[in-house]
Image (cartoon, helix red, strand yellow):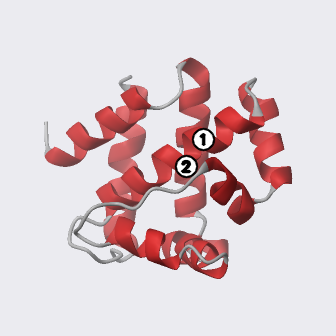
Amino acid sequence: MGLFDSVLKNVIGGAVGGGVKNILLQEAISMIANQQAGGLAGLLKQFTGQGLGDAAASWVGTGKNMPISADQLMSVLGQKKINQLAQKAGASPDDVAGGLANLLPEIVDSLTPDGKIPDNNGLEQGLGALKKLMGGL
């Protein structure tokens, strides 16, 4: 098992439980893979637009990841999106926002091991590895 696999298993294991975990992972993958919204770069730009650029940059960089709170994540994604995910997951909006706030920094960090956003091919490979891991959990 590679370092990427190990990190993602830790992320997946450390998030909220059961089906909620899978729904949050699927949502994180969807946000990162959404080319209409700019993919990973577009997602990070959303964080920058809400004053969280330093945190987002730390996830891509090679140093320590800066955390974000559930409230900060909610300000980026919006209450409506969080409520939709909460309903889909059968969890509270606070649990969903908190789970994504924990997952996104680690996933972005894992997808950017060289401290830069990979090209589309590299990103697709990383997301493919994540999807494969999800199927194995």
Tell which of 110 and 105 is nearer to you. 105
Percent position (x, y) of residue 79?
82, 52
Residue 98 relative to residue 79: left or right = left
Question: Residue at left 64%, top 56%?
Answer: 73
Name the amino acid, label 1.
Gly
The residue at which mark 2 appears reads as 101
Quadrant of the rendered image containing residue 126:
bottom left
Question: Residue at left 35%, top 77%?
Answer: 119
Question: Residue at left 29%, top 73%?
Answer: 61
Percent position (x, y) of residue 34?
60, 65
In the displayed structure, 102 sits above or below 57; it is above
Q: Decide: few, some or many residues near mark 1? Use Cα within 10 Å; few <14, some 14-19, many ≥20.
A: many
In the displayed structure, 53 sits above or below 132; it is below
Q: Which residue lies most toward the top here?
A: 18
In the displayed structure, 41 sits above or below 77; it is below
Percent position (x, y) of residue 13?
38, 27
The residue at which mark 1 appears reads as 98
Quarter holding the N terminus?
top left
Question: Residue at left 14%, top 43%?
Answer: 2
Q: How many marks?
A: 2
Residue 20 relative to residue 56: left or right = right
Residue 40 relative to residue 110: left or right = right
Quadrant of the rendered image containing residue 133:
top left
Are dots 1 and 2 in contact, CB under 8 Å? yes
Percent position (x, y) of residue 80?
86, 52
Q: Decide: few, some or many residues near mark 2? Use Cα within 10 Å; few <14, some 14-19, many ≥20.
A: many
User: Circle 2 — which element?
Assistant: helix
Residue 120 relative to residue 63: left or right = right
Tell which of 5 and 90 is nearer to you. 90
Q: CA distance from mark 1 to mark 2?
A: 5 Å
